[in-house]
Structure formats: structure tokens, C-alpha cells
Image (cartoon, rainbow, N blue to C red):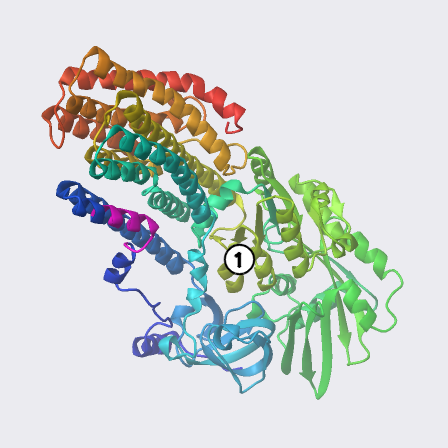
Amino acid sequence: MREGLTSSDASARLRQFGPNEVLASTVHPWLALVAKLWAPVPWMLEGTIGLEMLLGRRLEALVFTVLLAFNALLSFFQENRAQRALALLRQRLTVQARVRRDGRWALLPARDLVPGDVVRLRAGDLVPADVKIFDGQLLVNQAALTGEALPVDIEPKEPTYAGSIVQRGEATGEVIATGARTSFGKTVDLVRTAKAPGHLATLIARIVRYLVAFDLLLVVGVLTYGLRAGIPLAEIMPFALIILIASIPVALPATFTLATTLGSMELTRQGVLVARLSAIEEAAEMDVLCVDKTGTLTQNQPTVFALSPYPPHSENALLQLAALGCDEATHDPIDLAILAAARQRQVFTPPTGNVQYIPFDPATKRSGAIVHHHCQMHHILKGARQVIVPLVRDPPDQVVQDAEALGRGGSRVLAVAAGPEGALELIGLIALHDPPRPDSKTLVQDLRNIGIRMLMVTGDSLATAEAIGRQVGLGSRACPPEVMEGELGAWILEYDIFARVLPEGKFRLVQALQKSGHVVGMTGDGVNDAPALKQAEVGIAVATATDVAKAAASLVLTSPGLANIVSAVKMSRRIHQRMLTYTLNKIAKTFEISLLLSLGLLLVGVFVTTPLLIVLLLFANDFVTMSIATDEVSFGRTPDRWDVRSLALAALSLAAILLVFSFGVVYVGWNVLRLPIPTLQTMVFLWMVFSGQATVYLVRERRNFWRTRPGWWLIASTLGDVLVVGSMAIRGWLMTPISLSEALALLGVSLTYLLSGDFIKPYVFRRLGLH
């Protein structure tokens, strides 16, 4: 075998050729900013600017222009923040390569590879650079380069290219090109799934559609009344358009993006990399989690637990022959366990002749080696008893009973055979035990406590899966493997454990759960898990996962086990609550503003506020309340689901309470205080700002608002909003001034509304299923 490079040679070549990476293409910042002005919401604002200019309202047109620019810049900067989070992900989510340096095999980041390095490739790997094979054979998928789905066989002296996926086999080769010099040097860009959309776009579209439909009815009424009352069309048209503008949640997408981006950055610090921002939202809805056994519930550190040789062989002879069939370069946990046991017993002797390793193949379910020694070829095979025993001559009669006895406690049993080709002899059985992780039992209970059902889905034997299931408290209801071959339906939740499941079975299981109305999470670590990880709403690659599994997943764990999933779910539900707060607040305020403006005109006969003040209200309410994205809220104990109908009804109920106070303010100002119309318009504007902030605190918790302390950014935003807008109203900036006592009175009425609404809210939420 070629010895590869020394560390000093590799360092010199790294300086010469540069890192093994290709920078992703980027859009020029100015083009990205201009793109923010080309969308439905900006179109409405641009149309309003044009209309205001035609009507000669230059001040209003200027305010709308500022609003348009502010919204574009806000979205632009938030998208940049999301891209920085994704860049952090790419920095952490590095492809690993098995490299021979200084005469030893080591795992190194693929970006450190240089031409001349000797690397080892195996099933599940992304080829990290252009590599020329000199030993072994591979079956690779080159769809990322050629678009062809059919895999290609790679023989010795043939190259395989960066970005290809090794589907089967193992081979050693020499790196011939890295970075931009490769045929396809963008391996890390497989995490572009981070840009895949979730449900947010659909949700926002539904909310906007309902609000616009509601406001269109009001606009028709306002236009009809205005024309009958003789109000000039030049005055009533901008006002009607303002009602529509007020219903568009212009800051809702940016708020959602900010909330998920901040959440993803927090999860990164907790050991969970978010490869797709929408996965945070979907994790809040997840109610079923399918987990693998090995490396997830267990430690994935198998140790030789028992040896059962057959005469005339001894335990040491069994272990020695098994060790000869293990390739240390693959870093396979089973091979490493057998080698460690052989070294511990001091029976391992490296082969002196030529060795041709046979890598594990999921199709044959066995591995081994062909040892050339003294002009003879000795075959050594190891694998499942059901696979190896039919290949040997005269197997012992009690082999089935022995294998079942060894596997009864959850151990994995390997059969070892050796001898000339066509005359293999069964040497014995090796039991390997992969104990449960210490935190697995706690994990199962923690997930149950937050309303998530866990299912074990493994390719291991039924007996092993049942034993681990009992040890971690998952349950013992195991689905017979033959049942998984038929049509799957909602009945699958009658079982806790699914064993002997093939990769396509995992995919079908996820689909069946989704068709039954469940939001599914799926964990995995191998290339064969990639379809199921991609299909699940929340695909989770564990810390030891292959590069393909990480690329297919939406969440990637960076520490062993699944404990961080609980943190991810809790964080996602907190983010859901923040989004719910903003959405409820926006819908309630839209109902209140639209009805107050429309009915105010019908009942009082005048505009209760001005179009300019409504535009200022968008700044004072919509954008200031983006601080909700940082609020300190509790998380739900059950999975969250978006129900726009229930949200609309809840918001309408809260808006009804708000309207009582709003019309009370109008009545007092118009009939009791007999304020001039400009002063009344300022008072109504200030009331809508104060009550808007009160509504945020009213809906920020499903229980009473005082149960948890608001976030400091939210508190600071509220205080700043009240002080700035209050000062503008008192000093008469952009509006007719009102007195300090009137402003303080409106603040007191807002607090009264908050307490009254908080008394009624829990009952409304329970009735609508939002508790």
C-alpha cells in the first residue's frame, strides 16, 4: 500500500494549491437589494406612491417611499443574517476524509486534502476530491455531475470525481485534483437544502388573502358612503387604499425570518445545525419521531461480548481469524471492536502476505478478506448467521440455537467462516454488544413529556431491537418484519419497534405516517437513510452520519445521541409562540383598524384619523413589534399546529374587545370633550399605537400575560415606541398636538384594555383549541 504524504509535504502542497474548496456563487448586493422591490407587497406600496404623487400629496408619497425603502432594507439585512447563519453551518458541517498521513490513517477535513494524498473511500461517502483509484472497486452515483441516475463502476486506475456518492464498495486512491481544479468542487454546497421553503410562504399568503378579502368589503362600503355623502374622490381614494395597505403584514415575513434565524444560531451553540430554516417551524409541529437504534439509542461502540468457537478451534483462533478479515482503514465500528479484542488478548498478528479486503455490502450483508499466504488463498467471511451458514459445508446442528442464545440479551451475533474458496468452514460465532447510551432512557421520557411519540426503526434483528427497546423504556410492541412488506396505514402506531427494516421500508413508513396526518421526524446516519431523511418534515442526521445523510437532513446534530433534539423542539415551539404572537396581534389590529376607520366614517361622518397617521401607525406598530422575535416565552407541552381559522376567530374576539374601547375613545373625544376633528384624529392615532402595544402583551402568552417576563428587547421597543410617539403627539410633529393629560389618559385606558382582555382571553383560547 502506498504510504501517502508526510505532514510537511501536505502543508507545502496546501500552500501551493490552496484549500480543497470552491466558493459558492453569490449575487451582487445591489441586485439583491433591488430584487426586494419586485414583489406583491412592494408593488402595492409603489402603486400608492404613484397615486399620491398624482393627487399632489407629496408628504404622504415621501412617507410611503420611506416605508418602501425601510421594508426592502429590513428584508435585505435579515436575509443576509440568514445567509451568515448558513455560512456558519457550512463552516461547521465539513466533509471528512480518511487520509493516510505519516504512515497512519486519520480523519481530516476534506478542505485540507492536497494532490498526492492517499484516501480511503467507502459506501456512504461523498468523494471529497478527484481521486484515481489504485486498489479496490466502487459503485458511485455521479448524478451531481452528469445528471444520470444510474451508478457507475469504478475500477483500479480509473478516476472518480468530487461530488460523486459512493453507493457500494471500498477503495483506496490518490488525490489528483482539489478545489477549483476538480470536475465538481462544490461538495459542501449540497447543504443548499437550507433554502428549501417550508409552510411559511403558504401561511403568510393565506393570512394576507383573508385580511384583504375582509378589507375589500369595507372599502366597497367606504367608497359607496363617500360618494353618497359627496366626499371628493381625491380624498376618499387614498383613504380606501390605506385600509388595504394596513391589512398587509409587510413585516411578517421579515419577523418570521428573524425569529427562525436567531433560533438557528442559538441551536448551533447548543449542538444542532439548522440546514433549512423552515425545519425550525416544522419541528414545533412534529408529533412522531422515528429513530435508529445503532449510534442513536445505543453508543455505537460495540465490544466483543462473547465468543462461541466450534471444534477444533479455540476462542483465540476464532478471534484471530476474524481480526484478519477486518480492515482498520474503514473505521467500521464492528471491525474496530474485533481488532481491539484481538489486540487485548494479544492474538492479532498482521498478515504477512497480500490481503484483499472485501468491504461490507448491504446487498450480501457480509464482509471479509482474501489472504494470500504461501501461494495459497484463504477466504475469511463474517456476517449475519443467516448469510454465512449457507456458504459453509457441514455447519454444526446447534448453530441456530447458539446464535439465538447469544442474541437474546440484545447482542449482535456474527458468524465467522474461513477456508479455501468452495470449502469454507464455520469457525464460530462472535457476540458484540452495543449498550444503550446513558441518556437514552431519559430522552424517551423527555420526548413523551412534550407530546412526541418515539418509534424505533432499525435494520437490526427483532430480538436485539426488542431488548434495547425494553432497556430504554421505549416499549416492547414490535412489528413483525413481514408486516412491513404490505400496505402501511395508521395502524402502524400500534407498534413501538420496527426491526429488519430496509431503507425503502423507512421511506414508506415516513410516508404512511404523513398520510395519516402526522408531522414526522426521522433520524439517520447512512446513505441509505437519505430518502427517508429527505421525505420527513424534520430530517435529523446524527453526529456520526455520513456526508450524504447530513446533506439530506434539515437538522444536523454535532454531539452523540439525541438529547439535543429535545432542545431543538423546545426552541422551535418558543419560536412558534413568537410567530403566533405577531400573527394574532397583526390580525386583531387589522380588524380593529379597518372597522374603526370604516364604521367611524359611517357613524361620525368624518375620517377619525388621517392617511398620513395610518402610515405612521405601520411604523409604530408593525415594525416596532418585530422585537417579538426575541421575546422570552414559554413553549407548548404538545405539538403546535397552525390553524388560520382558529387564529382569525381568536383575533376577531380580541378585536371586538378592542373595538369597544376604541369607539369609547371616539365617543368621549367627539361627544364629551368635543374636540376639533384634527385633535380627535391625533387622539385616535395615539390610542391605536398604545392599544397596539397592549395587544402584543395580551397575546404573547396563551395563559395570562404576566406568567412570564417579556424579553428585554420587547420591553425596550415598547417603552421607546410609547415615548417617541407620545412626544410627537404632545409636541404636534406631523399631527395636531394634544395635551399631556390626554396622552396619559389614553395610556391608562390601554392598560385597562390589557387587563380586561387578559381576563377573557384564556376562555376564548380554550374554546378555539389554542390553549
Q: Secondary structure at mark 1?
A: loop
Magenta stretch mostly in which secondary structure? Answer: helix
Q: Nearer the viewer, residue 413 or 589?
A: 589
Name the image quarter holding the N terminus.
Answer: bottom right
- Residue 262, horizontal then vertical, whole percent: 36, 45
Q: Nearer the viewer, residue 456 or 505?
A: 505
Locate residue 139 relative to residue 365 in the image: left or right: left
Q: Nearer the viewer, residue 750 or 601?
A: 601
Q: Residue at x 53, y 24 (%)?
A: 767
Q: Residue at x 66, y 41 (%)?
A: 474
Q: Which residue is mark 1?
A: 544
User: Magenta segment, which residues?
Assistant: 37-49
- Residue 636, horizontal then vertical, whole percent: 49, 32
User: Is residue 124 depicted above or below 9 in this figure?
Assistant: above
Q: Residue at x 39, y 56 (%)?
A: 89
Q: How many marks?
A: 1
Q: Nearer the viewer, residue 1 or 515?
A: 515
* Amino acid marked by disc 1: Thr
Quarter of the figure with residue 583: top left
User: Is residue 739 depicted above or below 69 in this figure?
Assistant: above
Locate residue 526 relative to residue 366 in the image: left or right: left
Which class describes the residues within 10 Å of circle 1: few (<14), some (14-19), or many (20+)?
A: many
Quarter of the figure with residue 343: bottom right
Locate residue 270 relative to residue 478 in the image: left or right: left
Residue that lies at the very extreme toward the top in this rendered image: 672
- Residue 478, horizontal then vertical, whole percent: 74, 46
User: Is residue 392 depicted above or below 530 in this figure?
Assistant: below
Q: Is residue 590 magenta?
A: no
